[in-house]
Amino acid sequence: MRRIVFLLFLASAVIPNSQAQGQTYTLDQVISKLDQAGRDFRTMEAAIERTKVTILVNDKSTDSGKMYVAREGNSTRLKIDFTMPNQQSVLIDKGTILLYYPKLKQAQEYTSQNSNKAASGFLVPGLGQSAEEIKKDYDTKLLGSEVINGQKTTMLELTPRSPKFAAQFKSIVLWLDEQKWSPLQMRHNEASGDYQIMKFSDIKMNSKLSNSVFSLKIPKDVKVSKQTL
């Protein structure tokens, strides 16, 4: 699983310069609001901008595209289609993680009974998760509040409890919209010191998503490498 998460983060903007403002909510209140939002959550569609920073070589790269998330019961479906600067897709659905690189004509498929929920949960935490799930998977801490694109957000730090994920990620920071209590931005801090920020815009919550959104057709001339986790 650690390898899968690393691959997902290979396949959104830097932290704003404004200083964190005073906290408005207690930690228990924030977790409670996330719990309520999780019960109401069905789907999310958004534009995504992802910035990856590699400290050792002082490198920063940014790509953008669309993200789709749907949750029904304990099942989560997630798809990200990056279109700029290069096309690539990530699909997590029904126990399968599929990575597709059209320009390289390559795809990687990983199958595991438990990979679907774990990978999607750590890739986009705070979407459709209950308080019980959040407390089970993370230690939580409030970092204050900050305004993102004119919207006040509460900053919540998640520290993975799982040794496997903790070895990859030191922490995940969520900037939670204080109206919808969903992430406007999230930062994954890797154990190596590298980090990645994903920023969401044009967010549509609980709109109807066709099943075709969560399909990823691989051309016959594309080599697909298959592995079981």
Image (cartoon, helix red, strand yellow):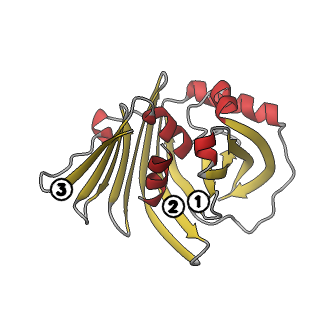
Marking on residue 50: 2
For the residues labelled 3 and 2, the Cα–Cα distance comes to: 26 Å
Lower position in the chain sequence, tag 3 or tag 2 = 2
Task: Give neighbour class at mark 3: few <14, some 14-19, many 20+ (Cα, 10 Å).
Answer: some
Figure quadrant of residue 191: bottom right
Q: From mark 1 to mark 2, how far is it between C-alphas?
A: 6 Å
For label 1, the residue is 197
What residue sits 44% from the left and 62% below the top?
A: 64
* Label ID, residue 222: 3
Specify the amino acid type for callout 3: Val
Quick one: SS at disc 2?
strand
Report the side of 160 relative to 60 (left or right).
Answer: right
Q: Residue at x 42, y 43 (%)?
A: 68
Q: Secondary structure at mark 3?
A: loop
Instruction: Say what secondary structure mark 1 lies in.
Output: strand
Q: Position of residue 77 (x, y in %)?
A: 41, 35
Tag nearer the camera, 1 or 3: 3
**Residue 28 horizontal side relative to residue 34, left or right:** right
Q: Residue at image x 30%, y 33%?
A: 211
Q: Nearer the viewer, residue 82 or 206?
A: 82
* Crowd tier of the residue under label 1, counting other residues whose Cα lies within 10 Å: few below 14, some 14–19, many 20 or above: many
Q: Say if mark 1 contacts mark 2, CB within 8 Å.
A: yes
Q: Verify CB contact (< 8 Å) between mark 3 and mark 2.
A: no
